[in-house]
């Protein structure tokens, strides 16, 4: 792909030089034109972009990238499929891609339309250092107890976009507590939790993996530690919790896939990346290179509508080789395509540039990957609690051969309504969703 981008730079650079002869400062129009010229060359649906497309209509390169989405026509789909092409200032992308956060480090979802819960916390963030945990009930924000679906926009602003905030939390088996938070820079740790369960006469490994972005050396070391533990404990089943994982680096996906694939898949096709007609010669196939000594014949994933891109690639790549079960409140997000960061002055642009398919030629899951069993996100339970709805359902299947059919509380029933699922799709918008080469 570097060769593709370099070729485009030569062409685009000529026009940029001529434009800059009379301008000391790079204009918005030049940046937008450069972004559009890249798209006309390497966008997966490049030949759909009309000559009348005017990049000057947009305020910045991100607007241009959002504008080209309208031309992503795909057979079998009635509307454009691209929901992801975007641009970001280089300074912001450098922080995001390296796993540096700058907010409270607390993410939230609705359990019901009037019950807001902490879905997860980054350990080194202000919220993590304050001891806030998944499952805590947010009763007030800045003294306002109007915590319901009608105030979603205000909640998003207060939780994700504010520099300070005061929260009243209800805690399980403890008194309510008020905590004041101040946004700060912190390092994210995608591997949030791991453990081993006794499941009848066997053992089951479980881990929560929240992003394929971040410090790749730390992630690699985390995989080594987790899978050595699973091997030493002689686990026979593994549950991978990707319910909030929006994707990231394909290289990290490849690494995790190599730990999970059974030995029979070693040196077999993992995935193929396909570019547009201009760059067919850059299509590439990756093969599995088995790591570790786990030899699983089935695999369980906990997913949701926030499970996207590299997470879906992992699932799709493994499906031809083993029995794969998906459990969660909704099917996955539906992003079988990826992109590269392309420098445009002080921006990076990310036009969708390739699609992925597995060994069987299966891809194009723009509507998401289907569930094996629908069950509510147990937002009232912390990570690793065997009573958490999704995890409990999987453990019951491993123990008894069927997904849990435990009594469903009114809250759990409400959490699967279309209103709450749509609401949480909005609450999850600030999170990155992508597949990066």
Image (tube, helix red, strand yellow):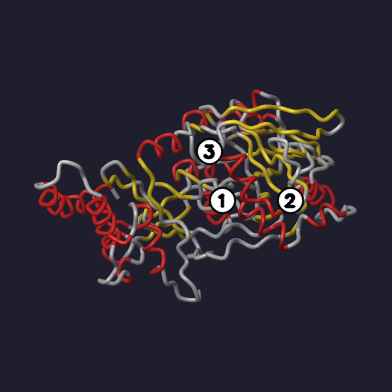
Instruction: Choose between 389 and 29: the one closer to the eye.
Output: 29
Q: Quick check: 350 above or below 194?
A: below
Labels 3 and 2 touching (C-beta < 8 A): no
Residue 55, image x, y percentages:
29, 61
Q: Which label lies toward us, 1 or 2? A: 2
Query: Which numbered disc flags the more N-terminal residue, 1 or 2?
Result: 2
Q: Quick check: 282 above or below 91?
A: below
| Gap between marks 3 and 2 measured at Cα | 46 Å
The residue to which callout 3 is attached is 291
Q: Residue at x 37, y 56 (%)?
A: 63
The residue to which callout 2 is attached is 148
| Gap between marks 1 and 2 measured at Cα | 17 Å
Asked if residue 363 lies left or right of residue 17, the reply is right
Circle 2 — which element?
loop
Circle 3 — which element?
loop
Residue 41, image x, y percentages:
26, 61
Q: Which label lies toward us, 1 or 3? A: 1
Task: Count residues near mark 3 (Cα–Cα under 10 Å), then give few for <14, some for 14-19, many for 20+.
Answer: some
Task: Count residues near mark 1 (Cα–Cα under 10 Å), then give few for <14, some for 14-19, many for 20+.
Answer: few
Asked if residue 347 lies left or right of residue 295, the reply is left
Residue 189: image quadrant is: top right
Task: Count residues near mark 2 (Cα–Cα under 10 Å), then give few for <14, some for 14-19, many for 20+.
Answer: some
Instruction: Choose between 29 and 334: the one closer to the eye.
Output: 29
Query: Which numbered disc flags the more N-terminal residue, 1 or 3?
Result: 3
**Residue lying at the far front of the rendered structure:** 143
| Gap between marks 1 and 3 measured at Cα | 34 Å
Asked if residue 256 lies left or right of residue 46, the reply is right
Q: Residue at x 19, y 42 (%)?
A: 25
Circle 1 — which element?
loop
Asked if residue 407 lies left or right of residue 126, the reply is right
The residue to which callout 1 is attached is 429
Residue 80, image x, y percentages:
46, 69
């Amino acid at each position: 792909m570097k060769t593709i981008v370099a070729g485009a730079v030569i062409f685009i650079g000529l026009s940029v030089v001529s434009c800059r002869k009379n301008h000391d400062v790079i204009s918005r129009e030049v940046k937008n034109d450069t972004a559009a010229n890249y798209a006309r060359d390497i966008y997966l649906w490049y030949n759909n972009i009309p000559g009348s497309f005017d990049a000057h209509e947009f305020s910045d390169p991100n607007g241009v990238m959002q504008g080209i989405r309208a031309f992503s026509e795909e057979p079998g789909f009635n509307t454009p499929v691209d929901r992801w092409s975007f641009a970001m200032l280089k300074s912001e992308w450098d922080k995001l891609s390296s796993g540096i956060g700058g907010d409270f480090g607390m993410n939230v979802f609705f359990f019901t339309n009037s019950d807001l819960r902490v879905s997860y916390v980054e350990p080194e963030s202000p919220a993590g250092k304050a001891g806030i945990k998944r499952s805590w009930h947010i009763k007030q924000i800045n003294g306002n107890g109007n915590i319901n679906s009608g105030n979603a926009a205000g909640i998003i602003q207060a939780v994700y976009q504010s520099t300070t905030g005061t929260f009243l939390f209800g805690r399980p088996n403890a008194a309510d507590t008020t905590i004041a938070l101040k946004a700060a820079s912190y390092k994210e740790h995608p591997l949030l939790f791991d453990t081993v369960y006794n499941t009848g006469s066997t053992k089951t490994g479980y881990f929560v993996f929240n992003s394929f972005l971040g410090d790749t050396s730390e992630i690699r070391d985390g995989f080594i530690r987790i899978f050595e533990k699973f091997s030493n404990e002689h686990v026979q089943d593994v549950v991978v919790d990707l319910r909030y994982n929006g994707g990231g680096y394909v290289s990290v996906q490849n690494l995790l896939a190599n730990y999970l694939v059974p030995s029979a898949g070693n040196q077999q096709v993992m995935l193929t990346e396909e570019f547009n007609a201009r760059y067919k010669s850059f299509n590439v196939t990756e093969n599995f290179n088995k790591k570790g000594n786990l030899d699983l014949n089935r695999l369980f994933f906990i997913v949701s509508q926030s499970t996207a891109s590299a997470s879906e690639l992992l699932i799709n790549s493994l499906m031809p080789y083993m029995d794969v079960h998906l459990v969660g409140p909704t099917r996955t997000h539906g992003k079988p395509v990826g992109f590269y960061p392309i420098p445009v002055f002080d921006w990076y642009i990310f036009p969708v540039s390739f699609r992925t398919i597995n060994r069987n030629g299966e891809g194009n899951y723009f509507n998401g990957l289907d569930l094996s069993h629908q069950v509510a996100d147990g937002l009232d339970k912390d990570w690793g609690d065997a009573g958490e709805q999704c995890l409990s359902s999987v453990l019951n299947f491993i123990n008894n051969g069927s997904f849990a059919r435990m009594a469903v509380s009114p809250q759990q029933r409400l959490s699967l309504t279309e209103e709450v699922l749509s609401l949480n799709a909005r609450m999850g918008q600030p999170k990155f969703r992508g597949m990066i080469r």
